[in-house]
Image: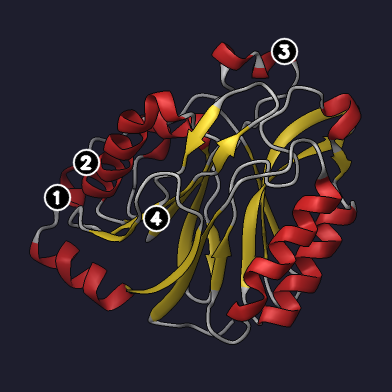
């Protein structure tokens, strides 16, 4: 696999069409088309085809359904990986599944571990059991979904990832928490952090203001827009700079040993 010391990462923040997968795919096709040849990784929000809905028995797709086919097509056309989460049905269970698809149609997946009980998510979805790290173009990527952000032990960097990605439908009422925790996860884990959230109002009358960000290992925001602003923005992150920083300030070497229970 080709290794890129630098990685161009594109964040896509937009409203979502409530429980309308076809319309959302059409929307994202138009939004990301200009990125062809201009990026290496495109990040979409949580449940980017439906919004954060609790009707998976109606809205969930099979694991190899139309959205995965669309992601493969887009990744090939853009010559870039594309990622985000969707509702998936598999083996009679429903999962909030983070998918990352490469230009070669290689599919990597992570099922959301921490289901949002205040939104009844555990009543409708099955929690994932496995923490995963993806390998893409020489970068080690930790995939996470929304509420996962609140659980630093699960996210703890054991010097096994360079970039953490959080895809979300995080309501505006808790925007300060979202922003604070994204910065904290970057600082404590000495990694790049991407957080992509939606804007607008969903079918449950919840408001979202976005605050999608890309933050570096020092806590500096490389991408950060005004609230409620739709945008597509690309910036470049650099693994040599990250590793130089960790070599000069190797706090990661003093982390406590532990084993995650499943």
Dot placed on the residue nearer the N-terminal end, 2 or 4: 4
Residue that label 4 marks: 160
- Mark 3 or mark 2: which is in front? 3
Residue at horizontal 71%, vertical 69%?
30
Q: Of helix, strand and loop, which one carries label 4?
A: loop
Dot placed on the residue nearer the N-terminal end, 1 or 4: 4
Dot 1 crowding, Cα within 10 Å, few <14, some 14–19, many 20+: few
Q: Is residue 161 above or below residue 207?
A: below
| Mark pair 2, 4: CA separation | 13 Å
**Does the rendering let one see residue 161?**
no
Q: Is residue 143 left or right of residue 111?
A: left
Residue that label 1 marks: 251
| Mark pair 4, 3: CA separation | 32 Å
Residue 47 x, y percent position in the rendering: 68, 41
Please identify the quarter of the rendering in which residue 237 is found. Answer: bottom left
Dot placed on the residue nearer the N-terminal end, 3 or 1: 3
Q: Are marks 2 and 1 in contact (CB under 8 Å)?
A: yes
Q: Is residue 5 left or right of residue 1?
A: left
């Amino acid at each position: 696999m080709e290794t890129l010391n630098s990685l161009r990462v594109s964040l896509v923040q937009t409203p979502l069409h409530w429980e309308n997968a076809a319309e959302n795919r059409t929307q994202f096709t138009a939004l990301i088309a200009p990125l062809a040849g201009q990026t290496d990784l495109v990040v979409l929000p949580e449940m980017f085809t439906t919004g954060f809905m609790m009707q998976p028995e109606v809205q969930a797709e099979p694991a190899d359904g139309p959205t995965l086919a669309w992601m493969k097509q887009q990744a090939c056309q853009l010559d870039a990986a594309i990622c985000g989460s969707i509702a998936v049905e598999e083996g009679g269970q429903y999962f909030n599944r983070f998918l990352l698809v490469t230009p070669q149609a290689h599919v990597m997946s992570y099922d959301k571990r921490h289901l949002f009980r205040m939104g009844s998510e555990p009543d409708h979805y099955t929690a994932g059991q496995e923490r995963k790290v993806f390998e893409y173009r020489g970068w080690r990527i930790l995939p996470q979904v929304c509420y996962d952000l609140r659980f630093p032990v699960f996210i703890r960097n054991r010097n096994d990832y360079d970039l953490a990605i959080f895809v979300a439908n995080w309501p505006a009422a808790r925007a300060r928490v979202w922003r604070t925790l994204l910065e904290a996860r970057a600082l404590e884990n000495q990694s790049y952090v991407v957080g992509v959230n939606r804007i607008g109002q969903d079918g449950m009358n919840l408001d979202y203001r976005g605050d999608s960000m890309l933050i570096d290992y020092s806590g500096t925001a490389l991408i950060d827009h005004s609230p409620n602003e739709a945008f597509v923005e690309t910036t470049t992150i650099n693994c040599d700079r990250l590793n130089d920083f960790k070599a000069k300030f190797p706090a990661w070497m003093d982390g406590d040993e532990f084993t995650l229970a499943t």
